[in-house]
Image: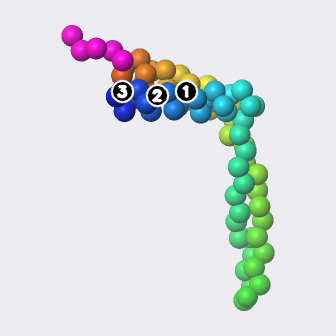
Amino acid sequence: MKPQVIAGIVLVVLGALVLFTGGLSFGSQRSVMRVGDLQVSAEEQRVIPAWVGGVAIVGGLLLVGTGLRKRA
Protein backbone atom coordinates (compact mmCIF):
# COMPACT_ATOMS: atom_id res chain seq x y z
CA MET A 1 0.00 0.00 0.00
CA LYS A 2 1.31 3.44 -0.90
CA PRO A 3 2.35 5.84 1.88
CA GLN A 4 -0.04 8.42 0.43
CA VAL A 5 -3.00 6.07 0.93
CA ILE A 6 -1.92 5.25 4.49
CA ALA A 7 -1.60 8.97 5.33
CA GLY A 8 -5.05 9.58 3.85
CA ILE A 9 -6.61 6.81 5.95
CA VAL A 10 -4.98 8.18 9.10
CA LEU A 11 -6.30 11.67 8.31
CA VAL A 12 -9.82 10.35 7.74
CA VAL A 13 -9.79 8.44 11.04
CA LEU A 14 -8.43 11.40 13.03
CA GLY A 15 -10.84 13.79 11.32
CA ALA A 16 -13.79 11.54 12.15
CA LEU A 17 -12.62 11.34 15.75
CA VAL A 18 -12.51 15.12 16.03
CA LEU A 19 -15.77 15.65 14.15
CA PHE A 20 -17.88 13.10 16.01
CA THR A 21 -16.59 13.87 19.51
CA GLY A 22 -17.38 17.57 19.15
CA GLY A 23 -13.71 18.58 19.13
CA LEU A 24 -10.74 17.27 21.06
CA SER A 25 -9.18 19.18 23.90
CA PHE A 26 -5.60 19.25 25.06
CA GLY A 27 -3.85 21.03 27.89
CA SER A 28 -0.93 23.38 27.66
CA GLN A 29 1.06 24.88 30.46
CA ARG A 30 2.73 28.27 30.32
CA SER A 31 4.75 30.34 32.72
CA VAL A 32 2.84 33.42 33.86
CA MET A 33 5.32 35.04 36.20
CA ARG A 34 8.83 34.33 37.42
CA VAL A 35 10.44 36.21 40.30
CA GLY A 36 13.74 34.73 41.41
CA ASP A 37 13.11 31.10 42.34
CA LEU A 38 9.34 31.58 42.47
CA GLN A 39 7.48 30.63 39.31
CA VAL A 40 3.75 30.87 38.69
CA SER A 41 2.32 28.85 35.82
CA ALA A 42 -1.13 28.43 34.37
CA GLU A 43 -2.64 25.43 32.65
CA GLU A 44 -4.96 26.15 29.75
CA GLN A 45 -7.35 23.77 28.02
CA ARG A 46 -7.52 24.30 24.28
CA VAL A 47 -10.11 22.73 21.99
CA ILE A 48 -9.61 21.61 18.40
CA PRO A 49 -12.75 22.85 16.60
CA ALA A 50 -15.02 20.39 14.81
CA TRP A 51 -14.53 22.06 11.42
CA VAL A 52 -10.88 20.98 11.50
CA GLY A 53 -12.13 17.39 11.57
CA GLY A 54 -14.21 18.00 8.45
CA VAL A 55 -11.22 19.49 6.63
CA ALA A 56 -9.08 16.50 7.68
CA ILE A 57 -11.68 14.06 6.36
CA VAL A 58 -11.88 15.82 2.98
CA GLY A 59 -8.09 16.03 2.73
CA GLY A 60 -7.72 12.38 3.69
CA LEU A 61 -10.26 11.29 1.09
CA LEU A 62 -8.42 13.29 -1.56
CA LEU A 63 -5.14 11.62 -0.57
CA VAL A 64 -6.69 8.16 -0.70
CA GLY A 65 -8.33 8.92 -4.05
CA THR A 66 -5.14 10.17 -5.67
CA GLY A 67 -3.12 7.36 -4.13
CA LEU A 68 -5.40 4.66 -5.50
CA ARG A 69 -5.67 6.18 -8.96
CA LYS A 70 -3.63 4.22 -11.46
CA ARG A 71 -1.40 5.94 -13.97
CA ALA A 72 -2.44 5.69 -17.59
Q: Is residue 69 above or below residue 59?
A: above
Identify the image quadrant of residue 63: top left
At x 75%, y 76%, the residue is: 33
Q: What secondary structure predominates along the stretch shown in magenta?
A: loop
Q: CA distance from mark 1 to mark 2?
A: 6 Å
At x 71%, y 40%, the residue is: 24
Residue 12 - label:
1
Q: In the rendered structure, does residue 69 fall within the stretch colored magenta?
A: yes
Identify the image quadrant of residue 38: bottom right
At x 78%, y 65%, the residue is: 42
Q: Residues within 10 Å of mark 1 (few under 14, many from 20)?
A: many
Which residue is the extreme one toward the front?
A: 1
Hey, what amino acid is under mark 3? Answer: Met
Image location (x, y in percent) of residue 70: 28, 14
Q: Residues within 10 Å of mark 3 (few under 14, many from 20)?
A: few
Q: Is residue 44 above or below residue 5?
A: below
Q: Is residue 69 above or below residue 18?
A: above
In the structure shown, which secondary structural element does the residue marked by tag 1 occupy?
helix
Q: Earlier in the sequence, mark 3 or mark 1?
A: 3
In the structure shown, which secondary structural element does the residue marked by tag 3 occupy?
loop
Tell us which disc is closer to us: 3 or 1.
Answer: 3
What residue is pinned by disc 2?
8
